[in-house]
Image (spheres, rainbow, N blue to C red):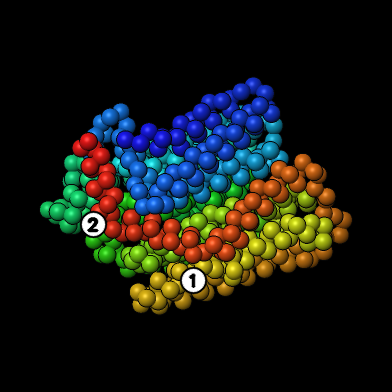
Amino acid sequence: MQPYIVLPLIIPLLMALTALARFRNFRRRLAQIGAFANLLACIALLIVTETGQIQVSQMGGHPAPYGITLVVDALSAIMLTIAAVIVFAVVMYSRAAIDTNRERFTYYPLLGCLLLGINLAFLTGDLFTLYVAFEIMLMASFVLLTLGGERGQLEGGLKYVILNVVGSTLFLIAIGLTYAVAGTLNLADLAQCLADAPAPGITTVLAGLFLVAFGIKAAIFPLFFWLPASYHTPPIAITALFGGLLTKVGIYSMWRVLVMVFPNELTTLQPLLFALAMLTMVTGVLGAVAQMDLRRLLSFHIVSQIGYLLMGTALLTEAGLTGAVFFMIHVILAKTALFFISGIAHEAQGSYDLKKLGGLRAMHPGVALLFIVAAFSLAGLPPFSGFWAKLLLIRAGLEAGQYLVVAVALGVSLLTLYSMVKIWNEAFWTPPAPGRVAAMLTWEDRRSLMFPAALLVVLIVSVGLLAEPIYRLSAQAAETVMQPTTYIETVLIEGEE
């Protein structure tokens, strides 16, 4: 048993409780300390697993497969660390982006609860605890989405919660049927039991149910409409957090459950996965191209980028999943940075409408530089992280002979570049509309808004420059999922002990 595995659960819980403090500055400071402590704990776990070790902890001393098992391998350590980076950046950004009223109504405690659910999803080794993690995330995210009670938030929150409750219900049904078939919910034990399932058709149905449930959470085609209808409604710090992390938990769950537990069934569903990947990419990017509201444009790009992750999953090869893990790291950083930059543009000119923005390049050249790096990375231009991520996916697709999905991925990259150029022309290059002048950001705004955005942009550049070690780490994570023998043996042996 490795007790330090629970730190990514204990720290967010303490962060949520202590952030209920009375004084505003004290709440902020406690939230920053909690987010930084969580980041350090997750980096430590990443360093431990980088050597190939898999860390297991059985909660309450109950052995696997009967108790709650927490597992940290290369994939979960990567996801924990990148989530910790984003939450730390969001907490810093919130100093200027969240108003006093929302702070007073438990904004920081809700961030702690959301981080608790995210970390639990990445740590858990059984299906029911994964369901609990999704419910914690759903409750915290719904309150964050509607915090402030504005009409647009309530309308977006209603759409958000209805479809996500449907997804949770399907997930729970799939869990019940899985237990009826296999008699266990432990992922390692399931991977063994379902390999000898007496009726393969049943397992294919189960895989399909999990695909729909996780597809709703990940916002894949045609289940994505709740995302662009809701993500643009809350303050930009909340939008950035949601856009960077929440849909990625759905994709992670596909890797952990579908790829590891239902590999044979995914082979049957592979044509469907490719079709969903292409449709998700195309509909997302076309929706983005049609938008003139900066937040809605970036929200549609969340959907489009999920299509690339689904493409890497559908290839069912280590090379494809390696590219998907690398792409996951890239897109979380790039997407969050772009939302941060859109918030800075709004702070300077009071609007998210591209037609009402302009002149930011001359007034705020530092913001323009940050945008160029994040936008070029999202579009897949070298030498930034997005180039290597897309290169890995394209190469894996060509090796698998999937030329159509490769062609679609390349075409979507061109449209992504077009939409980024549109933002540059309207918000940064074009002079401001008559009567509108870009405001100078205060020192407090520069420190609170620019620092988190600059931190993420530096990481984007670093991932591009350090592509080889990031690739090795991604390959290690993909191998754990595609060849789970070591994972299974480690979890079940720990359970016997």
Residue 427 position, x and y percent, is 74, 61
Is the C terminus in the top left, top right, bottom left or bottom right quadrant? Answer: top left
State whether residue 33 is above or below residue 417. above
Dividing the picture into quarters, in which one does residue 436 lie?
bottom right
State whether residue 472 is above or below residue 160. below
| Residue sitting at x 25%, y 39% | 494
Mark pair 1, 2: CA separation: 32 Å
| Residue sitting at x 56%, y 64% | 464
Amino acid identity at mark 2: Thr
Residue ranking furthest to the left: 198
Is the N terminus in the top left, top right, bottom left or bottom right quadrant? Answer: top left
Residue 207 position, x and y percent, is 28, 54
Instruction: Classify mark 1: helix, strand or loop.
Output: helix
| Residue sitting at x 71%, y 43% | 448
Q: Residue 391: which numbered mark, if any?
A: 1
Residue ranking furthest to the front: 51
State whether residue 471 is above or below residue 257. below
Instruction: Classify mark 2: helix, strand or loop.
Output: helix
Q: Residue 204: which numbered mark, if any?
A: 2
Q: Residue 171 versus residue 457: which sits nearer the camera?
A: 457
Dividing the picture into quarters, in which one does residue 373 lie?
bottom right
Q: Earlier in the sequence, mark 1 or mark 2?
A: 2
| Residue sitting at x 63%, y 56% | 458
Q: Residues within 10 Å of mark 2 (few under 14, many from 20)?
A: some
Residue ranking furthest to the right: 435
Left/right of residue 423 with respect to residue 432 in the rendered view: left
State whether residue 425 is above or below residue 135. below
